[in-house]
Image (tube, coloured by chain):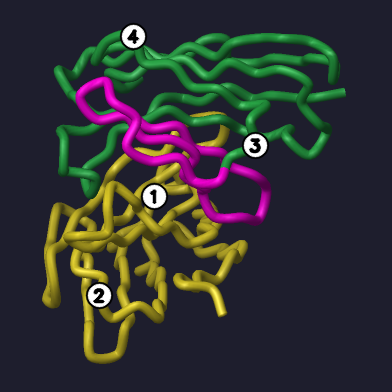
Chain colours: A green, B yellow
Amino acid sequence: ETGVTQTPRHLVMGMTNKKSLKCEQHLGHNAMYWYKQSAKKPLELMFVYSLEERVENNSVPSRFSPECPNSSHLFLHLHTLQPEDSALYLCASSRPGAQETQYFGPGTRLLVL
Amino acid sequence: QKEVEQDPGPLSVPEGAIVSLNCTYSNSAFQYFMWYRQYSRKGPELLMYTYSSGNKEDGRFTAQVDKSSKYISLFIRDSQPSDSATYLCAMSFTGGGNKLTFGTGTQLKVEL
């Protein structure tokens, strides 16, 4: 396993539920990322935090809400999701400005019923 | 047209074969080129990182970048069953923010 951990590893939720995904990095990095990985599609960057400040939000629906309380932790809060949001959600970290060397966690496999 | 094109495979080869994985891209601004390996039920793992054109070798792996043709390759020598995974290419450039642009990934199976 890498120095980036994610919990839970699997999540099943209904469209009316609220849940949160958690990511923690132990690499001393200061930039953290959320990605969505769907079958047969490239990884889609959702959010970027650098030095705990959100620096990128790639037109992600408001039903996804990120939170970065410190440089080691990143959350993705989920509410009123749609079945098409079912995917693997990956967290990554890097040094600020070193986006070319990102380290990924194992991901949370999300199923929305 | 996608910014990065990658054949999804699957690609099946016998153990010991030389494997060639490729990506083409359309944005000439890309300067950094990465290859990630992703095993089933795991996150991507950075394998190789190359800046600009040229070759880079690391053990059985060689990454090549041809910016004039907008074409990058990853070669795996003496392939092993443990190399069976999905290989993702990714690219970025200075001034492009924090964004990596990924290919869809090529699924590789190395058979005994």
Q: Inspect the magenta stretch and tell me whether residue A53 lies in it.
A: yes
Label ID, residue B80: 1
Question: Does B76 sit left or right of B67 as displayed?
Answer: right
Amino acid type of the residue that numbered disc 2 sits on in the rendered structure: Ala
Q: CA distance from mark 3 to mark 1?
A: 42 Å
Element assignment for label 1: loop
C-alpha separation, residue under disc 1 versus residue under disc 2: 35 Å
Type of the residue with mark 4: Pro
- Residues B46 and B9: in front is B46
Mark 1 is surrounded, within 10 Å at the Cα level, by few (under 14), some (14 to 19) or many (20 or more) other residues, namely some
The kind of secondary structure element at disc 4 is strand
Q: What is the number of the mark on residue B29?
A: 2
Q: Does residue A19 appear left or right of residue B47 in this picture?
A: right
Q: Position of residue B64 (x, y in %)?
A: 21, 73
Q: Chain of mark 3?
A: A
Q: Amino acid at mark 3?
A: Pro
Distance between the alpha carbons at the discs numbered 2 and 3: 29 Å
Identify the residue position indicated by label 4 in the image: A69
In the image, what residue occupies the spot 22% across and 63% down? Answer: B93
Residue beneath disc 3:
A61
Instruction: Name the chain under label 1.
Output: B
